[in-house]
Amino acid sequence: VYQRRRARILLAVLVLVSLVLITIDFRSEDGPLDGLRGVATTVFGPVQRGVGALVRPVGDAFSSVGELFDLRDENARLRERLEELESRRQSFADLERQNTELRALLGMRERLGIDETLVARTISFAPSNYEWVITIDAGSADGITRNMPVINGDGLVGRVVQVTEHASRVLLAIDPNFAASAQTARHAEVGSIRGRGGDLMLFRPIDPEPVVEPGDEIVTNQYEYGLFPSGIPIGSVEEVGEATTQLEREVLVRPYVDFTRLDVVMVILRVPVEAPPPVPDRPDEVPSIPDDLVSDDESPSPTPSPGGTEDG
Amino acid sequence: MLRALVMTLVLVTTALVQTTLLPHVALGGFAPDLLLLLVTAVAMRDGAASGVRVGFAAGVLADLLLQESPMGLTALVFVGVGYAIGLARPYLAPESVTAPLLLAGLSGLLGTAGYGVLSRLLGDERFTFELVLSASVLVALFNTLLAPIVVAGIRALDTHFPLEGPARAH
């Protein structure tokens, strides 16, 4: 009986402490608890790096045992992938052409290209089945800041969400909290893509009747959030759903990146085209025309009154 | 004292395995929840008081290593699991083989689902019904499979470092 009472008191106290922690965490952005997490990353980082290097062969062995069962699928997939790569070679020619055109249009603008990158290694994954976050072995000392895009040889991996001096945490693209602007490579159907946990990602084209079919490649687009440079491959369309009642179509995308076997990743330190500053939204104001642009035969009125355009 | 130290070591090692090795065995994006299984095993062996204490420590450790979830939520869920399993302990046959498997599966299912439901109640929209269901079922399955190893490990730990510290008595 004594044991049980003690357990009950302990339960009450620790539940209370947990609730207090949750409340503090909810009320403060970047508060003391976030600092604690930074400390945890700093302390655990080096150990995880060592253990990770040790267990990676074991993990690979596990993975290959699992793979024995679906070698046939793998074969079919590889064949498909080969065809896909063939077609991508064509789209590369198309891209190059587009690039030339864009360059002509942009005139003096600098050539698009990602110059400043940093290679890092994955040292651990989040200890939860609801969070798809990895820790990498590079941090603020290497020039990493929050929200930087992370890619690997296959495509988009995610973005940086926490930085300490020598390690950072990266939110993977398959995490439900992850969202980015994206488009189909072939027909430039623009939309947003988000993780949904687990295997597949969800692409929502803006156009409810988009030209999308299984096998189409989805790439990033620097249109809306501006975090990711355009053209990073994300995945291929697996299934195109019916339009919902809100006239949204849900397209399932299989990411190119194998998120269970992340190792070497690349952080993009500077996105080539910065997002322009937001345009102030003041509809009542008529833009003032500089004096020297007003033609001579009109009466000079340097500052038009706000109500001056009602006839238009 | 010595037991607490050993338990801390076990917790840290488990967290390391959870964050480095287990993601490689993930199925459909979901991996075993070794920390939850450890809490279950301790509560099954030593009762509710130990379950609650170890549950809180394991939960806070997991929370520190998480990024997107509120701090303290895993602790809350693990404390609940530790207490519930501890309460069930007197009704288990000591040498039963099926009971630990069943409880490990059950705690995996309810612990993972509970975490998902609480997060949703706290306003986290990413926890869809489909996500919580698939995570819970897979964790339950994984944890049932891993239960014999972890339960045996905790039993060994208990024989070497018993709960009420008779090792310090002499």
Image: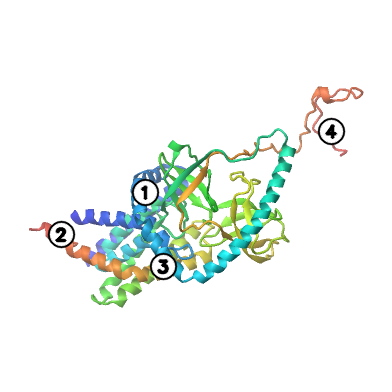
A109 and A76: which is toward the camera: A76
Bin the neighbour count of mark 2 within 10 Å (Cα to Cα): few under 14, some 14-19, many 20 and up: few
Chain containing the residue with disc 3: A
Please name the residue shown 35% across and 62% down the image: B34
- Mark 4 or mark 3: which comes first in sequence? 3
Chain containing the residue with disc 1: A
Residue at which label 4 appears: A308
Residue at which label 1 appears: A49
Bin the neighbour count of mark 3 within 10 Å (Cα to Cα): few under 14, some 14-19, many 20 and up: few
Q: Colour scheme used in the picture? A: rainbow
Bin the neighbour count of mark 1 within 10 Å (Cα to Cα): few under 14, some 14-19, many 20 and up: some
- Mark 3 or mark 1: which comes first in sequence? 1
- Secondary structure of the residue carrying numbered label 1: helix
Instruction: State the residue lying farthest toward the left.
Output: B170
Identify residue type, mark 4: Gly
Label 2, label 4: how far apart the Cα atoms are: 88 Å
A118 and A135: which is toward the camera: A118
Q: Nearer the viewer, mark 4 or mark 3?
A: 3
Q: Is residue B90 visible?
A: yes
Chain containing the residue with disc 4: A
In the image, taking residue A120 as reference, residue A254 lies left or right, namely: right
Residue A257, given in percent of the width and then of the height, sits at 53, 56
In the image, taking residue B89 as reference, residue A274 lies left or right, namely: right
Label 4, label 1: how far apart the Cα atoms are: 67 Å
Identify residue type, mark 1: Arg
Kindly check if marks 2 and 1 are in contact, taking CB atoms under 8 A apart as contact. no
- Mark 4 or mark 1: which comes first in sequence? 1
- Secondary structure of the residue carrying numbered label 3: helix
Label 2, label 3: how far apart the Cα atoms are: 43 Å
Identify residue type, mark 2: Gly
Residue at which label 2 appears: B165
- Quadrant in which the C terminus of chain B appears: bottom left
